[in-house]
């Protein structure tokens, strides 16, 4: 007889939330292997079964045991709470099997039985917090370096995901939740709703609805999942709700589409439309800089320049992309603009303005050196992937050099002499624009 390994996720803990297939797999198995707490949770299904209980730290032992038993021709159910593929035993089991030379074509078959993972089980108890983009992060640093975890918390905090924190705290790991809170408070309001769900669908189930700035002081343990809202999540009647976005398109939930929107079509701010919206925003708000528009739309400066370059309806702003093979020529072209203003922005906010002449440039390998008596500025030219000429009527004319993430590397602007731009410099700028820019029909 050929052996088989079922990798069974049995859901949050109660039998009625276990899938039909999970019960059938356990019923079919000769041997059931699991962490002792999991074995206890499904004990009623284990009558007449061979049961192998292992401790929490013996995860790899459980996988090896499952493989050894399957090699004897037995059907083995390796069980885990929630979904066995979510922070569960599915990964380690495949790793052990593959290391031992097993292949999917071998006599021992493997079936993964999915289950309801903690984040959906916990969400179901507090309302509808996951109705929009969400992600999960485990705060366990037992196998993952903390800087990796912190970087992920920071990224999803910034990107406005709803977040489910697994493994938020244990007897020994008490400060991770404090650090996570501090990182998230850099991006989210203190009053952001948080649901703390302990032992969902188990005997000791407990729920706390709190604010983000209260989260770390709450009762949180090994069997807790923490759900943190995004910027539009709210609490009403004790329910945590993340809107699906209908209000962006419809007058009311059952009403007509708003002006400019169509049912079944991308929003006017969708993939195709948002650049037009950005130009409209600039046109409707004279005096707005490209940086301010980038901040308002939550995009990089390069994306703003790209959006402006695609239409002539951005108010006082105009832009044109420099053809990829003409970026160096575009840099050289600034030599005919007379006295230049070089601008370099540091990420943390410092802005450096340098006055220079075209003669001050010098390219050495990957480095562009802007050197004169007053300063030395060295720019890693290999970081420059795009360039745009841009103008803001009577206010600024220049070129922006952009990196692959759309960030400004530096820009060079024409300077005014006695309150106005020189006619020659403007003419030269205009010629460069026409000669080196990518024209749209
Ligand atoms: C190693 S992970 C296992 C996750 C599991 N495979 C799943 O899909 O839910 C353990 C973490 O899952 C969460 N968890 C599991 N069962 C839970 C429950 N019944 N209630 C709340 N959180 C739970 C907790 O965050 C806990 O620290």
Image (cartoon, rainbow, N blue to C red):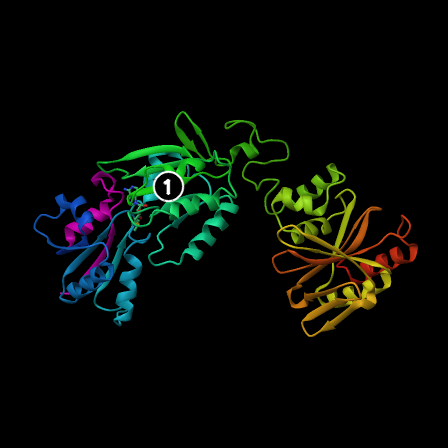
**In this figure, what is the number of numbered marks?**
1
Between residues 291 and 438, which one lies in front from this camera angle?
A: 291
| Quadrant of the drawing holding the N terminus | bottom left
Residue 111 appears left or right of 367: left
Query: Could you tell me residue 191's position as x and y percent?
Result: 47, 33
Residue 302 higher or lower than 282, as above or below: below
Residue 294 appears left or right of 255: right
Query: Could you tell me residue 313's position as x and y percent?
Result: 75, 43
Residue 298, picture quadrant:
top right
**Was residue 256 drawn as part of the magenta stretch in this picture?**
no
Q: In the displayed image of the protein, which residue is found farthest to the bottom?
A: 365
Residue at the spot x=48%, y=46% of the render?
183
Residue 262 appears left or right of 125: right
Q: Residues within 10 Å of mark 1 (few under 14, many from 20)?
A: many
Residue 194 appears left or right of 342: left
**Was residue 7 drawn as part of the magenta stretch in this picture?**
yes
User: The magenta stretch spans which residues?
Assistant: 1-29
Q: In the displayed image of the protein, which residue is found farthest to the top?
A: 237
Between residues 330 and 396, which one lies in front from this camera angle?
A: 396
Q: Is mark 1 within 8 Å of ligand 1?
A: yes
Query: Could you tell me residue 14's position as x and y percent?
Result: 22, 40
Q: Which residue is mark 1?
A: 226
């Amino acid at each position: 007889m050929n052996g088989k390994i079922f990798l069974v996720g049995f859901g949050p803990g109660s039998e009625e939330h276990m899938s039909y297939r999970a019960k059938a797999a356990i019923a079919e198995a000769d041997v059931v292997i699991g962490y002792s707490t999991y074995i206890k949770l499904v004990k009623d299904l284990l009558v007449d079964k061979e049961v192998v209980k292992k401790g929490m730290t013996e995860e790899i032992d459980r996988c090896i045991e499952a493989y050894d038993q399957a090699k004897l021709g037995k059907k083995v159910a390796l069980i885990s709470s929630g979904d066995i593929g979510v922070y569960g035993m599915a990964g380690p089991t495949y790793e052990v099997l593959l290391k031992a030379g097993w292949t999917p074509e071998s006599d021992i078959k493997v079936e993964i039985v999915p289950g309801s993972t903690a984040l959906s089980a916990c969400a179901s108890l507090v309302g509808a917090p996951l109705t929009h983009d969400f992600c999960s992060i485990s705060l366990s640093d037992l196998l993952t370096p903390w800087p990796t975890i912190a970087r992920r918390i920071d990224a999803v905090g910034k990107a406005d995901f709803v977040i489910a924190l697994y493994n938020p705290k244990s007897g020994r790991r008490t400060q991770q939740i404090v650090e996570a809170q501090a990182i998230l408070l850099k991006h989210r309001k203190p009053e952001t709703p948080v649901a703390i769900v302990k032992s969902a669908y188990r005997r000791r189930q407990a729920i706390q609805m709190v604010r983000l700035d209260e989260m770390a002081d709450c009762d949180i343990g090994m069997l807790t999942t923490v759900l943190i809202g995004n910027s539009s999540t709210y609490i009403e009647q004790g329910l945590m709700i993340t809107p699906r976005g209908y209000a962006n398109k419809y007058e009311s939930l059952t009403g007509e589409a708003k002006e400019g929107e169509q049912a079944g079509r991308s929003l006017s701010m969708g993939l195709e439309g948002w650049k037009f919206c950005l130009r409209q925003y600039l046109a409707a708000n004279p005096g707005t800089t490209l940086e301010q528009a980038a901040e308002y739309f939550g995009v990089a400066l390069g994306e703003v320049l790209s959006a402006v370059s695609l239409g002539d309806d951005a108010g006082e702003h105009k832009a044109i992309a420099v053809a990829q093979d003409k970026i160096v020529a575009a840099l050289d072209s600034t030599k005919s603009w007379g006295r230049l203003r070089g601008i370099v922005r540091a990420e943390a906010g410092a802005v450096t303005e340098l006055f220079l002449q075209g003669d001050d440039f010098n390219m050495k390998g990957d480095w562009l050196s802007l050197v004169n008596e007053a300063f030395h500025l060295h720019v890693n030219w290999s970081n420059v992937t795009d360039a745009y000429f841009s103008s803001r009527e009577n206010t600024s004319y220049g070129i922006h050099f952009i990196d692959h993430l759309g960030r400004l590397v530096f820009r060079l602007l024409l300077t005014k002499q006695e309150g106005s731009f020189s006619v020659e410099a403007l003419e030269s700028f205009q010629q460069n624009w026409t000669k080196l820019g990518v024209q749209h029909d």
